[in-house]
């Protein structure tokens, strides 16, 4: 049966849920969600230790004053169960569920240029015709799993961290192999180490991580926030990462070594997750300064880990701090002082196969009961690319993006009219606090749609020229920053054969949002709007 609605929203993560809330007052909206619950990232990532690395008073919705006043976060950095509980509370409180179809994947979408309608097909066999599509599909949605041979021969269980069983896993008495030491792996490792008989951590590239200093949220601090929540939210949006980390104007070059050390020590102990990256104003732009911070973290690793050989293996030396997303941990380095944890360097001795009893590297076999792959995601483009999307003149998104994603403002793709993305390629994405910036992008998108309706337009598209100019701008901003100097999901280098350049806007959220606002206020610069009879 074919259904007609105004707007289809793909994904009921935090941005998709807010899009439902924001738009359903004026439009008939329908949201499709692949999971059987809401919350997106915080629905799927239920591995032990999963928690946010931005303080929860910030990493939460701002759209409703009563909600932000009434909701109480138990901890400074909330754990996954609390974030999922929050998502469910919001879905119930604002009656979003009636607009959300769970356990339903959008498989295919085709734009009909004659009617200016998208035809959206789901894995449940239904077709929905709509005027606009908002893809709130998430930056980190499609898991990346290693494809070594022999997977089917392994007699134990293999779990990607996004596929952790809902009922949990009892790892006591088990030999567990954890592959990957990104933000996910370093969060899961301490919890697995506590349970397992033995944990083998298979590390290809070490990461820079700083202690989160997580703790119960104290009432005084919470009240401080709640006394002027709206004001603080406004301040957040003026900052690079849409977060109230403490920025400084001081260059490391203007400090004595003793002053540098004192500032680094203070940042390390700040209990504010990203503080190491802003301890001096030039950490992300001056390699000499970046080196000072790197060496400080390496010193901390060497002080923490008793085995000098293991400590050296854990010290990153091949890329600058901040080049990959900085990790934030709860006792990660300390696990290597336990007798039941072994670090395996798979850079020098790569994994080559699964075996019936575990994993084989070029030089050794490891007997394991459970293998956990914390191997990351086909990030940023993965979720869009797994939908068969056909735009004007039968052009497929997979073809258009075969050499890497092209967008204007990270929001629209030329030749794919009336399709908007939230946290799309070349938005600040994980460089900025994603709930608040997702809300901002949804509001911007909703305003664009409102303008279309009020002014009698039927189609909005962008142009290849606007895309090119935008990408030149995004590239220009990332030149000269440390981001260009590391292989990671930011540039797709974590996925073998993935093409495309740097996919994140690193000019900061204020500059990004200003560009979006400027385009609209400047008579929809870079966009082409047309009426149905045009
Ligand atoms: O993924 P990653 P993640 N053989 O891509 C390794 C957000 N997040 O899920 O670096 C061996 O960072 C890979 O090694 P290498 C956050 O934005 C946030 O950990 O490619 N190893 C790497 O060590 C984060 O940045 C939070 O050499 C292989 C690891 O797997 C993003 O999610 C928590 C391999 C993948 O690291 C992604 O983090 C968790 C192979 N074949 C995540 N393939 C918080 O808010 C991959 N690896 C706290």
Image: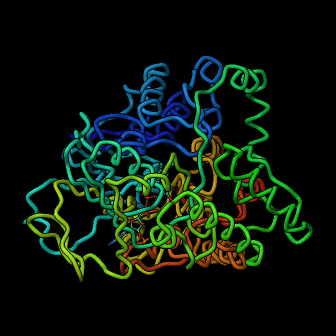
Q: Residue at x 47, y 65 (%)?
A: 307
Tell me what residue is drawn at x 38 percent, y 35 percent: 38
Q: Position of residue 239 (x, y in %)?
A: 76, 50
Q: On the picture, is 154 further left or further right than 332?
A: left
Q: Is residue 166 above or below residue 485?
A: above
Apparent side of residue 440 relative to residue 143 in the rendered image (left or right): right
Identify which residue, 179 or 95, lies in the foreground. 179
Q: Is residue 282 above or below residue 237?
A: below
Give the percent coordinates (x, y) of residue 11: 40, 44
Tell me the quadrant of the picture where the N terminus can be found.
Answer: top left
Seen from the viewer's position, the closer of residues 450 and 214 is 214
Instruction: Name the one closer to the observer, 88 or 193.
Output: 193
Query: Relative to residue 55, is residue 176 depicted above or below?
Result: below
Answer with left or right where residue 260 lies relative to residue 393: right
Q: Is residue 449 visible?
A: no
Q: Quadrant of the C terminus?
A: bottom right
Q: Position of residue 106 (x, y in %)?
A: 30, 50
Q: How many marks?
A: 0
Image coordinates for residue 525, horizontal then vertical, percent: 71, 63
């Amino acid at each position: 049966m074919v259904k007609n609605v105004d707007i289809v929203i793909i994904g009921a993560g935090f941005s998709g849920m807010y899009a439902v809330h924001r738009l359903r007052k004026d439009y008939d909206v329908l949201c499709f969600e692949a999971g059987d619950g809401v919350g997106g990232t915080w629905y799927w990532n239920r591995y032990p230790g999963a928690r946010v690395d931005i303080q929860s008073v910030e990493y939460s919705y701002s759209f409703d004053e009563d909600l932000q006043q009434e909701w109480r976060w138990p901890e400074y950095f909330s754990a996954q169960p609390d974030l999922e509980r929050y998502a469910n509370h919001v879905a119930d409180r604002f009656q979003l569920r009636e607009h959300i179809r769970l356990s339903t994947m959008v498989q295919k979408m085709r734009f009909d240029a004659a009617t200016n309608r998208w035809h959206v097909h789901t894995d449940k066999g239904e077709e929905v015709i709509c005027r606009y599509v908002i893809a709130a599909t998430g930056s980190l949605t499609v898991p990346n799993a290693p494809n070594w041979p022999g997977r089917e021969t392994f007699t134990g269980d293999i779990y990607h961290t996004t596929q952790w069983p809902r009922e949990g896993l009892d790892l006591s008495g088990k030999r567990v192999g954890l592959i990957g030491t990104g933000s996910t792996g370093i969060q899961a490792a301490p919890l697995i180490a506590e349970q397992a008989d033995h944990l083998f951590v298979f590390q290809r590239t070490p990461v820079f991580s700083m202690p989160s200093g997580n703790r119960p949220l104290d009432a005084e601090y919470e009240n401080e926030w709640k006394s002027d929540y709206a004001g603080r939210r406004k301040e957040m949006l003026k900052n690079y990462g849409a977060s109230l980390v403490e920025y400084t104007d001081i260059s490391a070059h203007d400090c004595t070594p003793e002053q540098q050390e004192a500032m680094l020590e203070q940042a390390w102990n700040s209990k504010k997750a990203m503080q190491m990256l802003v301890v001096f104003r030039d950490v992300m732009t001056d390699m000499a300064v970046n080196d000072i911070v790197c060496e400080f973290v390496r010193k901390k690793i060497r002080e923490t880990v008793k085995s000098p050989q293991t400590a050296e293996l854990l010290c990153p030396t091949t890329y600058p701090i901040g080049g990959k997303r900085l990790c934030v941990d709860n006792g990660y380095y300390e696990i290597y002082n336990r007798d039941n944890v072994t670090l395996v360097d798979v850079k020098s001795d790569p994994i080559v196969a699964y075996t019936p009893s575990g994993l084989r590297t070029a030089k050794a076999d490891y007997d394991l009961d459970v293998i956990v792959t914390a191997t990351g995601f086909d990030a940023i483009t993965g979720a869009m690319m797994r939908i068969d999307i056909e735009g004007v003149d039968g052009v497929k998104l997979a073809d258009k993006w075969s050499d890497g994603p092209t967008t204007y403002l990270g929001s629209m793709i030329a030749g794919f009219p009336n399709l908007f993305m939230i946290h799309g390629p070349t938005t600040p994405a994980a460089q900025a606090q994603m709930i608040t910036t997702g809300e901002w992008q949804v509001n911007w998108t909703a305003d664009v749609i409102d303008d279309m309706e009020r002014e009698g337009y039927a189609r909005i598209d962008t142009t290849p020229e606007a895309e090119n100019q935008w990408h030149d701008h995004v590239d220009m901003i990332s030149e000269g920053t440390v981001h260009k100097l590391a292989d990671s999901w930011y540039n797709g280098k974590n996925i073998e054969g993935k093409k495309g350049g740097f996919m994140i806007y690193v000019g900061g959220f204020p500059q990004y949002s200003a560009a979006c606002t400027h385009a609209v206020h400047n008579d929809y610069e870079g966009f082409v709007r047309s009426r149905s009879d045009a």
